[in-house]
Amino acid sequence: MASSSAVGKLSREEFRRQKDLDAARKAGTAPAALDEEGKPINPHIPQYISQAPWYLDTGAPSLSHQRRAEDSEPSNLDAWYDRGATAGPAAKKYRKGACENCGAITHKKKDCLERPRKKGAKFTNKNIKADEVIQNVELGYAAKRDRWNGYNSADHKKIYAEYAAVEAARQKLREEEIDNQTTTDLAAVRKMAKAGKTEKKEDADFGSSDEEDADEDKYADAADAVGQKLDAKTRITVRNLRIREDTAKYLINLDPSSAYYDPKTRSMRDAPDKDVPAEDAKFAGENFFRSSGEAPAVQQLQLFAWQAAARGNDVHLNANPTQGELLHQEFKEKRQELKESTKGSILAKYGGEEYLQAAPRELRQGQTEDYVEYTRTGQVIKGRERAKARSKYPEDVYVNNHTSVWGSWYDVSSGTWGYSCCHSSVHLSYCSGEAGIVAAEASNAQNLLSAPPEPGAQSLGIPPSKTEASHENVEQNYSKKRMGEGDFKLDKDRLAQALKEEKKRSRADDEDDRSGKRQKGVASGSHDVTEEELEAYRMRRRITEDPMANYVDSDD
């Protein structure tokens, strides 16, 4: 029944109607009842849950009595009255309605905590105290019942200081009495000591550290040893779980997301410090100890005992550990023999034993036990030198009278490889020695162009200026300076002329790109590029990767 109990007693007709409505709601033919918040109430909720008690009944269907009441804002447990807080500076004159004793307006004379004055501030208008702050501290359930709420730990220091001062005064008085004692009578000294002990017993409020120092030797014999609990009377030693000087497992790493510590079994399976290697860690976890040392062997032995017992054999590791160990050794030997026999039968039937014979591990890893001594220059003086690794290709094989291999020389002018012994760039050619080197240098295009003019050139009427100009062109085109590798000099007039031509060429290219057509019949000049033309091209080239390429100064 999802509705609350109705006020008063229902008639028979009303009760029958209520039953029919509940049945229709459960069947889904009638809409569910709504609570005071407009939320539907499940009609299948039993009546003892949906019906509110008489002291919470509102007369309407509701489930608010089953929900937890929303707590108000929790109060701070440390909230307490600010002792001695004043509201600003004190008044200069007495105010009407203020305390007649101290002059503060926040309380009356009967509530004043100041010392009663002979003449109050009402009549003297002097030494008027500041107004206190009226604080309204709202305390919750726990704060109201907190015994130590509002306690100031600094108050205990005053008590400690008082006790220390009294003890120091008593010690000083005892020393003065001993210094002033002139007699050496042993009986008088004993009487004074006995009187001091009686005084200590009568003064129970103030203890003395001398008595504790005297009792240290008394209880030293009965003290517990480190890591064990020893009863001096019965001489029974009980070993504790751990030495108390050792750091507890749960204190190694205080991070809440670190390894889980089970307080019931006092075990921590994972390592508390993941960054520290397990070998260097103070504690690496229970799992590390279970997988190190002889622990794996014990686990295998226990597993063998369980499996043997499951197959019907009378093997119990705890009842007879020697029998279990012997049976385990016998089982491992039989398993190895079976493995070898199976391997031998397979090899006898299919063959391939030669593929299983691998090289020794020392040879595979390049390690050996041979002792070899070397000199400072690297020569072997004792032992046998390690053999060098050889490739599958023939090495140091010279053909056709060559003294070097193919690819030992590179021709920069032609960009081809050859032999360094004869500078021949033809593969498998016959070596010609030094004569081939001289012939290769003489047949170089750069040497041919830079050669001095023959005597027949003067007879043909070729002026020497043209010869020198051609020599400069050759030097400029074929030297390393052409690509900007060395220091070179640029002709200013030629550079200016090259810049003009480069501007015309770039403007013509832009017009052709804009019109989408190329002029036919205009052939590009086929001549050697000079250093001035190359420098003009570099100066006019637009570098798209430069972030300042499109920058325009607006001030200019």
Image (cartoon, rainbow, N blue to C red):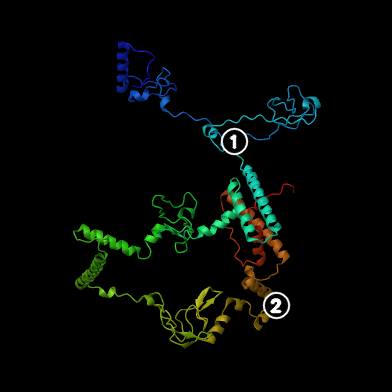
Give the residue at x 38% y 75%: 364
Q: Which residue is mark 2?
A: 464
List x then y, in percent, for residue 53: 39, 22
Q: Which residue is at a point 61% across and 72% down the rendered structure image?
A: 478
Q: Quadrant of the N terminus?
A: top left
Decide if residue 163 is in sight here: yes
Tell me the element at label 1.
loop
Q: Position of residue 399 (x, y in %)?
A: 44, 84
Left or right of 381, for residue 516: right
Left/right of residue 121 with respect to residue 396 in the rendered view: right
* Residue on which disc 1 sits: 79
Q: At label 1, which amino acid type do we have?
A: Ala
| Secondary structure of the residue carrying numbered label 2 | helix
Q: Closest to the observer: 56 or 427?
A: 56
The amino acid at mark 2 is Pro
Label 1 crowd bin: few (<14), some (14–19), many (20+), radius 10 Å:
few
Q: Residue at x 39, y 58 (%)?
A: 287
Residue situated in front as seen by the camera: 201 or 514: 201
Q: Among all residues in the image, which is located at the extreme bottom?
A: 381
**Residue 479 got which mark?**
none
Q: Could you say where residue 357 lies in the image, as x and y percent from the top left?
A: 30, 75
Image coords of residue 73 (percent x, y)? 54, 32
Do we see residue 42 in this rendering? no
